[in-house]
Amino acid sequence: MSEPVLNFLTIIIAVILLSIAAYQDIKARMISDWLWIFMIGSGSMLQILQFITMLNSTTGWQEYLFSIFLNIIIALLIGLFLTLSALGGEADRIAFFAIAFVTPLQSPLFSIASPEYSYLFSFLPKILGTFFNAYLLAIPVPIGIFFFNFIQKRRNRANYAYQHNSRWEKIFINFIGYPKTTTDIVKEIQTNPWHFDFLENFIEGEWKIQIQLQLDTPEADLERKLKVAELLESEKKKVVWVQPSLPFIAFIFIGFILEIFFGNLILSIMSLVL
């Protein structure tokens, strides 16, 4: 089987599986483990076939093997970074590792990078392109939340009463969350437990906004959310600040597509500006 055919099959498998994962993330914020297992397994098989094909040509296989392992190592480092920084969930970390096995190593189809940097970009792990592209796409989200709050505050100022927060904390909170009515909040948590998290918690006898940086196990998080929801109903609190859960696998999926067509957008734009 020729290299172009193997590359095409790799891309098709990646696109199909990532589109399913993105749909599951948007719908329920949960992704089936079999998607990542199949992605790693099929990707490994196709990469081995590609390596064997390149062995027959006696040239280029060393660089190919090095690029594959570097891609996987960088994916592991991305997962470690997301874990330590609390910027990504468990599915996001696994996604980058799985994508490393199905990322085609050829140059982007329509590179927008400055020509003098093209050779340098060819050495960069492709998984970095997906990573940077995904977070570039996510930048407008907190800006959108801020403007949503800006508009809603003028319609219902009572929902935007803060307690025990500094001026800078109030500004930051408006970028990551918004006030939500508590009607049927327990039922909503039971039905869609991962669509949002509570920014407000009952601490020392009063409701305070407390940013949840690090998630616990899914079971512990669900138990915590249900306790907060039940307390909201018993206290008859009408509004609570929440932080929406971003379906980040969808951003990773689009970032992967952009990497195939245009490469690493952030570095490409920087190469044109600098």
Image (tube, rainbow, N blue to C red):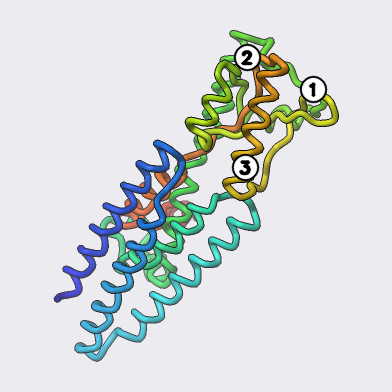
| Location of residue 230 with respect to 210 vertically, above or below | above
Mark closer to the observer (1, 2)? 1
Q: Amino acid at mark 1?
A: Gln
Residue at (18, 69) in percent of width and height: 4
Counting other residues with Cα less than 10 Å from the Cα at mark 1, is it few (<14), some (14-19), or many (20 or more)?
few
Image spot of residue 28 (x, y percent): 43, 38
**Residue beneath label 1, please?**
163
* Helix, strand or loop for disc 3: helix
- In space, the residues marked 1 and 2 are separated at their CA atoms by 16 Å
Which mark, by number, is residue 54? none
Residue 235 found in image quarter = top right
Considering only order in the chain, which callout, 2 or 3, is on the residue closer to the N terminus? Answer: 2
Q: Amino acid at mark 3?
A: Asp
* Helix, strand or loop for disc 1: loop
* Helix, strand or loop for disc 2: helix
Image spot of residue 167 (x, y percent): 78, 27
- CB under 8 Å between discs 3 and 1: no
Image spot of residue 46 (x, y percent): 26, 72
- CB under 8 Å between discs 3 and 2: no
Which mark, by number, is residue 153? 2
Residue at (37, 45) in percent of width and height: 22
Considering only order in the chain, which callout, 2 or 1, is on the residue closer to the N terminus? Answer: 2
Residue at (55, 50) in percent of width and height: 88
- In space, the residues marked 3 and 1 are separated at their CA atoms by 25 Å
